[in-house]
Amino acid sequence: MALLVREEALDVSVSFNSFAFQESDDSLVPVPYAQAYERGGFLTQHARRIDVYSGAHTHDAEVRVRVWGTEPETGGGPWDKQDEVDFESATGDVAIWSTVHGRLPDLISLGAPGRWRVRVSCSGRAEAKRVSEQEGVAYGVEKYVVDFWLQR
């Protein structure tokens, strides 16, 4: 059974259907967010960066980040989307980026540099899109669970 090392809940400002997880030291990111951003795919992996394509254009998503000692189980759904990618961190710290707001104030501490595996799970995509288009900015309708674990 995987050991949960840390967990935090964040509100992430999504704009232009996008946000990203990026190595905290921007000088170590060859192509920083939002350069080479690709619309439409759920997750896009870049060197020291993961782009997330959201279901809604402009809204605040609820993002729960969990850091594990080993690979966690995949339960907890149902999910609209779920995917995994690799992520390399030179510092052990990850920043969150938004297209309009730039670097957000929250910092995710992985606890160690290294090669990580990341699973991103999402629900509420269609409802966030509907609320954003018909009622205005959706708050916490689209929900993410982001699991990081160190590859051995």
Image (cartoon, grey):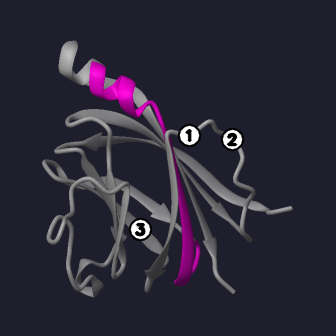
Dividing the picture into quarters, in which one does residue 138 lie? top left
Report the quarter where the C terminus lies.
bottom right
Dividing the picture into quarters, in which one does residue 36 lie? bottom left
Vertical placement of residue 143 versus 36, above or below: above
Secondary structure found at label 1:
loop
Determine the CA span between mark 1 and mark 2. 8 Å
Determine the CA span between mark 2 and mark 3. 24 Å
Vertical placement of residue 72 versus 89, above or below: above
Determine the CA span between mark 3 and mark 1. 24 Å
Mark 3 Cα within 10 Å, few/some/many (few <14, many 20+)? many
Mark 1 Cα within 10 Å, few/some/many (few <14, many 20+)? some
Residue at the image point whose x is 17% and y is 64% from the top: 34
| Rendering coords of residue 4 (x, y %) | 73, 58
Residue at the image point whose x is 25% and y is 50% from the top: 18
- Residue segment shown in magenta: 111-130
Mark 2 Cα within 10 Å, few/some/many (few <14, many 20+)? few
| Rendering coords of residue 131 (x, y %) | 29, 18
Nearest to the eye among marks 3 and 1: give it.
1
| Rendering coords of residue 98 (x, y %) | 23, 52
Tag 1: residue type? Trp
Vertical placement of residue 65 versus 27, above or below: above
- Residue 132 left/right relative to 66: left
Disc number placed over residue 76 in the picture, else none? 2
76 in the magenta segment? no
Secondary structure found at label 2:
loop
Tag 2: residue type? Gly
Disc number placed over residue 79 in the picture, else none? 1
Residue at image mark 3: 94
- Residue 118 left/right relative to 130: right
